[in-house]
Structure formats: structure tokens, C-alpha cells
Amino acid sequence: MKSHTDYLWFNTKSRQEIVDITDAVAQHVSESAVKEGFVLVSAMHITASVFVNDHERGLWHDILKWLEETVAPWDPRRYRHNETGEDNGAAHLRSLTIGHEVIVPITKGGLDLGPWQRIFYGEWDGKRRKRVIVKVLGE
């Protein structure tokens, strides 16, 4: 079995941001020379996420609004975690809700995604350097 590991680095301009990383992941899959297998894409920070969904700005707006209004409003007084001097309790809950990794099949040397599926990095506590691991496994 072949294995290929690489990293994507992010330093977002906003505290919350959604970034389409599909093309970068596809490039790493291509470099791996794996024709049949899987790629694991995982945020290496507890206030970020990796997820698969549709590339559509209205949906991104809906996701951010849902996180803010329903899942974890950005209200530092609301979270016990913030009693430690942090202010990012909401970001931890958002990451927990969205998830921190995805596994995508590789078929015939490429990502085997559905017609509207893309891979995204979700930053919930940004403006600092963070990374995602891209681990390709297969034959």
C-alpha cells in the first residue's frame, strides 16, 4: 500500500471563514500516484473543521448563520471554557458540531465525489496560522 502525507496551511483573514480546499486535496492525491484508495483530510486544530458540502455562497451564509444562531452563539460569557481566559468556547462547539475530518474515496486516481460535492475547511477561530493534514492511502 502507498502512503502520501502533506499539509495545507491557513491563516484566515476573518475569525470565521469557509475555504474550498477541493483542488488542493486533488493535487495531493495526484502527487501520491494512488489510483484506488482513500484520502483523509483532517483539521489539526480543535477550533476548525473539514466537511463535504455544496460550493454555494448562500449555503455558506446559511451555515454560518445556523452556527451563530442555533449551535453556538459567539457570546464569551455563555461558556465555562472562557473562564480560563479564552474567548473561543463557541469555536470549540462549532468544530464539534461540523466535525474535524472527512474520508473521501479515490477512484482511477481522482477524488470520487458526487456532482455537487466539494471539500471545505471551516475556520471558527481564525486570524492565526493553522493546518490540515492530507493523508492518501491506497494502491
Image: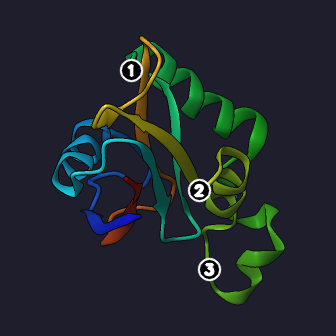
Work out whether mark 2 precedes mark 1 in sequence or the reverse, and give the earlier one: 1
Q: Secondary structure at mark 3?
A: loop
The amino acid pointed to by label 1 is His
Q: Is residue 34 left or right of residue 75?
A: left
Q: Is residue 132 left or right of residue 125?
A: left
Q: Is residue 45 left or right of residue 90?
A: left
Decide: marks 2, 1 in contact (CB < 8 A)?
no
Instruction: State the residue at coordinates (69%, 64%).
Output: 76
In the figure, 127 relative to 61: above or below?
Answer: below
Which sits in the foreground, 68 or 45?
A: 45
Query: Mark 2 highlights which residue?
Result: 100
**Quadrant housing residue 100:** bottom right
The amino acid pointed to by label 2 is His
Q: Residues within 10 Å of mark 1 (few under 14, many from 20)?
A: some
In the figure, 20 relative to 93: above or below?
Answer: above
Q: Residue 50: percent from the left, percent from the top?
A: 50, 48
Q: Residue 66: percent from the left, percent from the top?
A: 67, 30
Query: Mark 1 highlights which residue?
Result: 55
> What is the distance, in whole Å, between disc 3 and disc 2 at their CAs?
20 Å
Instruction: State the residue at coordinates (73%, 47%).
Output: 97
**Quadrant housing residue 80:** bottom right
In the figure, 16 relative to 32: above or below?
Answer: above
Q: Residue 114: percent from the left, percent from the top?
A: 47, 17
Mark 3 vs mark 1: in front: 1
What is the number of callouts on the image? 3
The amino acid pointed to by label 3 is Glu
Query: Mark 3 highlights which residue?
Result: 86
Q: Residue 28: percent from the left, percent from the top?
A: 23, 53
Q: Secondary structure at mark 2?
A: loop
Which sits in the foreground, 120 or 2?
A: 2
Instruction: State the residue at coordinates (16%, 54%).
Output: 31
